[in-house]
Image (cartoon, helix red, strand yellow):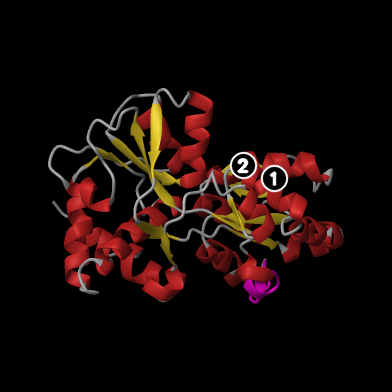
């Protein structure tokens, strides 16, 4: 199984919990790197990646059916997350919402969205917030996001590196992170060191899953791979996702974890950005908005 760095712990737990083996331990790493590995021939039976765009890239090379996103409920995203802030205990810089990240003297840590799939969600969450607070003005949203990235002290290549920079190296006032990563950090490293700030609104992050058709057809493992993915939607699978700090889709399971996941206004990539293909072209392609705001 091929997993992004942000879903590694979940993949491992599911591997153990289901009792289903699909040819070895989960292979983890950044979403784009994992997609490239699968394109280049790594024999993963299933993928769980941060972006639907990365699964589409594999499908374009013929290794996954192009209709993959419709094969499972909720556009093949069995659980969700969102983008939050991890701050140091006591929140010394008084960071409460996205607008606080552009204030002078605030040191922000976030990965580079050109190299990190997870970081693209961070970027688009900030952009969406700015749009909503500027009457949909794209130019003003770009100004806001440019100001935010001017406050970024270290732009790591991946989400795990950014977390290490903030947590282990002690750099920065705030880490923009997936909610599951932030909850994992506070639970593993101590709530006496860090706290989570949930902004007023953020993006609905939807990590997606798919069978790798070329591999399972070749190996004869299609039935077990499909059963594994369907298990993710079962009450037991949803419980495992919630215990690994992903927001479950199942309403009954979600209700049990109300105290873990604060309510906030969530917007989607389809509604605000026209889907991943358009968002990638507009914001993260060569010459896109990220390149434009990165010019010093």
Circles 1 and 2: CB distance less than 8 Å?
yes
| Observer able to see residue 278 | no
Picture coordinates of residue 183, whole percent (x, y): 50, 38
> Is 144 situated above or below 110?
below
Between 223 and 259, which is closer to the camera in this rendering?
259
Mark 2: few/some/many CA within 10 Å (<14, 14-19, 20+): many
Give the side of residue 262 with respect to residue 13, left or right. Answer: left
Q: Which mark is residue 130?
A: none
Between 273 and 253, which is closer to the camera in this rendering?
253
Picture coordinates of residue 170, whole percent (x, y): 32, 25
SS state under label 1: helix
Q: Residue at x 57, y 55 (%)?
A: 49
- The answer for how far apart the CA atoms under marks 1 and 2 are is 6 Å
Give the side of residue 289 with respect to residue 206, left or right. Answer: left
Q: Which residues are magenta?
A: 64-72
Query: Which secondary structure dominates the residues rendered in magenta?
Result: loop
Residue bearing mark 2: 244
Picture coordinates of residue 292, whole percent (x, y): 20, 61
93 falls in the magenta region = no
Residue bearing mark 1: 240
Q: Residue at x 41, y 44 (%)?
A: 177
Picture coordinates of residue 149, whole percent (x, y): 23, 49
| Observer able to see residue 152 | yes
Between 55 and 72, which is closer to the camera in this rendering?
72
């Amino acid at each position: 199984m091929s997993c992004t760095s942000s879903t590694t712990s979940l993949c491992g737990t599911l591997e153990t919990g289901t009792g289903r083996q699909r040819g070895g331990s989960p292979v983890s790493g950044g979403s784009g790197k994992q997609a490239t590995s699968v394109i280049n021939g790594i024999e993963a039976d299933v993928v769980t990646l941060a972006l639907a765009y990365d699964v589409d890239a594999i499908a374009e090379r013929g290794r996954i059916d192009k209709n993959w996103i419709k094969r499972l409920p909720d556009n093949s995203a069995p659980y969700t997350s969102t983008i939050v802030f991890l701050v140091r205990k006591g929140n010394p810089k008084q960071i409460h919402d996205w607008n606080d990240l552009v204030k002078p003297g605030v040191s922000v840590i976030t990965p580079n969205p050109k190299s990190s799939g997870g970081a693209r969600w961070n970027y688009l969450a900030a952009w969406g917030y700015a749009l909503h607070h500027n009457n949909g003005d794209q130019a003003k949203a770009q100004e806001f996001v440019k100001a935010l990235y001017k406050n970024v002290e270290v732009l790591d290549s991946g989400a795990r590196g950014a977390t290490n920079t903030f947590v282990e190296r002690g750099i920065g006032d705030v880490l923009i992170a997936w909610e599951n990563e932030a909850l994992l950090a506070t639970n593993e490293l101590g709530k006496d060191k860090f706290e989570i700030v949930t902004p007023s609104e953020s993006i609905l992050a939807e990590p997606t899953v798919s069978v790798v058709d070329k591999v399972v057809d070749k190996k004869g493992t299609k039935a077990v791979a499909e059963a594994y993915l369907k298990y993710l939607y079962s009450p037991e699978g949803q419980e495992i996702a919630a215990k690994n700090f992903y927001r479950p889709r199942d309403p009954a399971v979600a209700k049990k974890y109300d105290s873990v996941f604060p309510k906030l206004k969530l917007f989607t990539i389809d509604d605000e950005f026209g889907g991943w293909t358009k968002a990638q072209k507009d914001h993260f392609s060569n010459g896109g908005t990220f390149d434009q705001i990165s010019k010093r």
